[in-house]
Image (cartoon, rainbow, N blue to C red):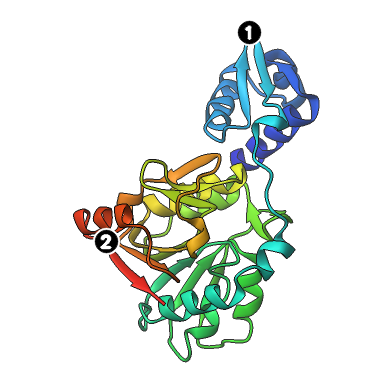
Amino acid sequence: MRTERIDQVEEYILTNKTVTIDQLCEAFKVSKNTIRRDIGQLLDRGRIKKVYGGVTALPDSSLMTLTPYSLRNTSFEHEKDLICRQAASFVEDNDLIYIDTGTTSQNLIDYLGNKKCTIITNSLQVALKAVNYPNITLISLSGKLKRETLSFVGSTVEEALKTYNIGKAFLCCTGVTIENGLTNASMDEYQIKKIVVENSQCRYLLADHTKFGKFSLMTYSPLSAVEHVITDQTPPNDYLNFFNTHDINLRIT
């Protein structure tokens, strides 16, 4: 499959740092036109760049370091739990929803009670929790496991997401500002979140108070694209004015 080859091409470039078009053609037994199309798609992920006659991997110093999952999972646990409880009140029977990866959203499933809904997710934690809820239909997106986020990533996840019409998307972020929108520190997650925003009818941002006024490496959505913001404390006045201007519903837990 083309999506699998693209992942392999990216891994080859990241491993070898700088490679020529000819080297890629030889390694994957495809034409130059095919490799150029693959490179065009990989450029959107932001991990490589073109150089004369080939491509090179961007240096690690250009990437923000992710906070380890174990540390994120134990910070502001109570606040995140209340956010999930509030978010669950928006879910109705027969909804098709997306639950994002992230420690803020992973407990949402625990508050859906006996609601009969379908969940799409690339989160390993959400998928494991769904086993205990027979009323929930789970669509788990398969890909390469990223241990830093306990999520599945890669082209197979991205292509699968494009086929679904998501009703409600419950999103997380590394930081959110009015100027930079919803940002994320993981390049692997960036494209997935972007596709979810583009393919969902209604978007809910789940973010504790520490996320406001901060931004990270990549913007996956403007703040104006969300319809609901659920947080644990009242944001600063400039955010309140922005929400009012753009008709964004704010819920404080």
**Residue nearer the viewer, 67 or 131:** 67
Q: Quadrant of residue 91?
A: bottom left
Q: Residue most toward the right?
A: 16
Residue 128, above or below 64: below
Q: What percent of the width, then of the height, locates residue 190?
A: 53, 45
Residue 123, above or below 37: below
- Nearer to us of marks 2 and 1 is 2
Label whose residue precedes the other's in the sequence (2 or 1): 1
27 left or right of 249 in image:
right
Q: What percent of the width, then of the height, locates residue 78?
A: 57, 78
Residue at numbered disc 2: 248
- Distance in Å between CA atoms under marks 2 and 1: 46 Å
The amino acid type of the residue labelled 1 equals Tyr
Residue at numbered disc 1: 52
Q: Secondary structure at mark 1?
A: loop
Q: What percent of the width, then of the height, locates residue 142?
A: 63, 58
Q: Quadrant of residue 61?
A: top right
- For disc 1, the neighbor class at 10 Å (few under 14, some 14 to 19, many from 20) is few
The amino acid type of the residue labelled 2 equals Ile
Q: What percent of the width, then of the height, locates residue 236?
A: 36, 57
Residue 181, above or below 173: above
Question: Image point 48% across, 90% down: which residue?
Answer: 113
Q: Quadrant of residue 133?
A: bottom right
